[in-house]
Amino acid sequence: MQLARVIGTVVATVKNDSLEGRKLLVVQTVDRNLEASGKPMVAIDSVGAGVGELVFWCRGKEASFPFKREDTPTDCTIVGIIDSEQHVTK
Amino acid sequence: MIIARILGTVVSTQKDERLHGKKLLIVRPINVDGSDTTGYVVVVDTVGAGYHERVLVVAGSSARLAQGLKDVPVDAAIVGVIDTVDVN
């Protein structure tokens, strides 16, 4: 899992039926100093995260586990919201 | 998932039988601001996307979880057509 900052939203009306009702967010991965690192990705939200929040996300097939796992095609899912930046011990 | 733009199509007659009837497209990953990156990926389309549209591409084994791709040998699939990307 990796730390990331939610930096935006994505709207897609036409999508695979298995993604119906899912919230799509743009996440920017950050390093331990909370500086941006790497390219932003589009993630599905499983925890109710919002723009500006610090989150952690899961990649790969495991990303579908928070949902009906055999049914949700995602390789990038937000699985937790970090309480505050002070809760990231460097 | 990544954002990509559709560059073209691929036609393949001789292929795994589970790929029969699947639309193959060439896409180029793009940045959230819409600018191009390098490289390209061949993907299976599950939503009926068209040329030059911005799409959502899921990669890896998760691509097989898309409806219609169960047990199909793919590692990249289009799962959505993007209307807007709003980045602050």
Image (spheres, rainbow, N blue to C red):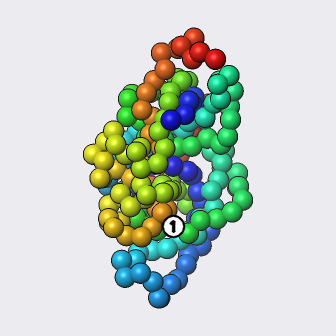
Residue sitting nearer the eye, A56 or B21 = A56
Residue at image location 70% in from the left, 55% down from the top: B36
Residue, far bottom: B14
Dot 1 crowding, Cα within 10 Å, few <14, some 14–19, many 20+: many
Residue at image location 55% in from the left, 50% down from the top: B2
Residue, far top: A86
Residue B59: horizontal and vertical position, in percent? 50, 56
Q: Quadrant of residue A14?
A: bottom left
Check the image and report above or below for A89 versus A49. above
- At label 1, which amino acid type do we have? Val
Residue B30: horizontal and vertical position, in percent? 64, 53
Check the image and report above or below for A73 versus A55. below
Check the image and report above or below for B25 versus A22. below
Residue at image location 63% in from the left, 30% down from the top: A30
Q: Is residue A40 left or right of residue B83?
A: right
Residue B4: horizontal and vertical position, in percent? 58, 57
Residue B48: horizontal and vertical position, in percent? 42, 66
Residue B16 can be seen, yes or no:
yes
Check the image and report above or below for A37 versus B20. above
The quadrant of the image that shows the C terminus of chain A is: top right
Residue A85 can be seen, yes or no:
no
Count of marks overlaid on the render:
1
Mark 1, secondary structure of its residue: strand
Q: Quadrant of residue A80?
A: top left
Residue sitting nearer the eye, A52 or A72 = A72
Residue at image location 59% in from the left, 65% down from the top: B41
Residue occupied by mark 1: B43
Please give the chain letter of the residue carrying mark 1.
B
